[in-house]
């Protein structure tokens, strides 16, 4: 499953059905990171939850006493990207199942001396490099589009960053770019991955 960095009270739920006569002794939650497995905490049959006092687990996690086999991430950081395991211990038997959590980071522009590029004035025949740096997870793709005189998007002129347009003619001077707020998007399953940087020519 995916969780957005900064989200709070994110529930990891394991659904199960015990066969007739099964005697559940303990429900234990583990975090598996880089091949290491640590017990986060456990829930007893009489609905008493205990989170272990290690690795900031009591700050990071909670165990629901109102839902069956539910581990709660209090606040998602990149540290919470890991595999989580629920283990049911029964008389004469155990059951385990894992959930992988992928942490998504919203796209944002990276500010630096060269990015984002300021308005540019170029001489005919000279070279120009435009920057539109952005960070996020998944990593954003940068799309440069030509903006028409009526303000609508025209053709895509370049994919990638930076962009080095070539062959300026006289009517292409005073090139400037603008990034509207609505143009910043990220790839979360059904969303198309792109960051839109518009260059007015």
Image: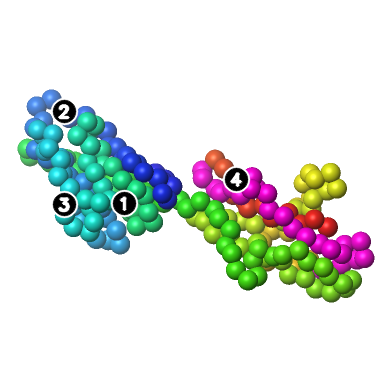
| Disc 3, SS | loop
Q: Percent x, y for residue 192?
A: 60, 45
Disc 4 crowd rating (10 Å Cα; few below 14, some 14-19, many 20+) is few
| Contact between labelled residues 2 and 1, with CB atoms less than 8 Å apart | no
Where disc 4 sits, the SS reads loop
Q: Which mark is residue 83?
A: 1
Give how far apart the Cα atoms at labels 3 and 1 are: 18 Å
Q: Nearer the viewer, residue 83 or 72?
A: 72
Q: Quadrant of residue 97?
A: top left
Asked if the stretch drawn in magenta spans residue 187, the answer is yes
Magenta span contains residue 177: yes
**Residue to which mark 2 is pinned:** 19
Nearer-N-terminus badge (1/2)? 2
Q: Which residue corresponds to mark 3?
A: 52
Of 84 and 11, nearer the camera is 11
Left of 43 or right of it: where is 99? right
Q: Earlier in the sequence, mark 4 or mark 2?
A: 2
Q: Residue at x 87, y 67 (%)?
A: 168
Q: Mark 4 highlights which residue?
A: 192
Q: Badge 1: how crowded within 10 Å, few (<14), some, or many (20+)? A: some
Residue at the extreme top: 20
């Amino acid at each position: 499953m995916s969780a957005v960095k900064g989200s709070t009270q994110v529930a990891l739920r394991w659904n199960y059905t015990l066969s007739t006569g099964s005697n559940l002794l303990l429900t234990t939650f583990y975090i598996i990171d880089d091949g290491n497995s640590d017990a986060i905490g456990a829930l007893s049959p009489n609905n008493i939850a205990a989170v272990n006092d290690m690795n900031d687990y009591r700050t990071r996690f909670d165990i629901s006493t109102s839902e069956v086999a539910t581990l709660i991430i209090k606040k998602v950081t990149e540290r919470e990207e890991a595999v989580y395991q629920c283990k049911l211990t029964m008389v004469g038997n155990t059951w385990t199942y894992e959930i992988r959590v992928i942490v998504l980071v919203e796209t944002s522009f990276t500010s630096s001396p060269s990015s984002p590029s300021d308005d540019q004035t170029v001489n005919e025949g000279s070279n120009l490099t435009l920057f539109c740096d952005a960070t996020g997870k998944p990593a954003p793709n940068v799309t440069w589009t030509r903006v028409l005189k009526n303000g609508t998007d025209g053709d895509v002129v370049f994919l990638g960053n930076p962009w080095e347009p070539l062959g300026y003619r006289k009517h292409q001077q005073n090139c400037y770019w603008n990034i509207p707020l609505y143009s910043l998007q990220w790839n979360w399953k059904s969303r198309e991955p792109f960051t839109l940087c518009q260059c007015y020519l």
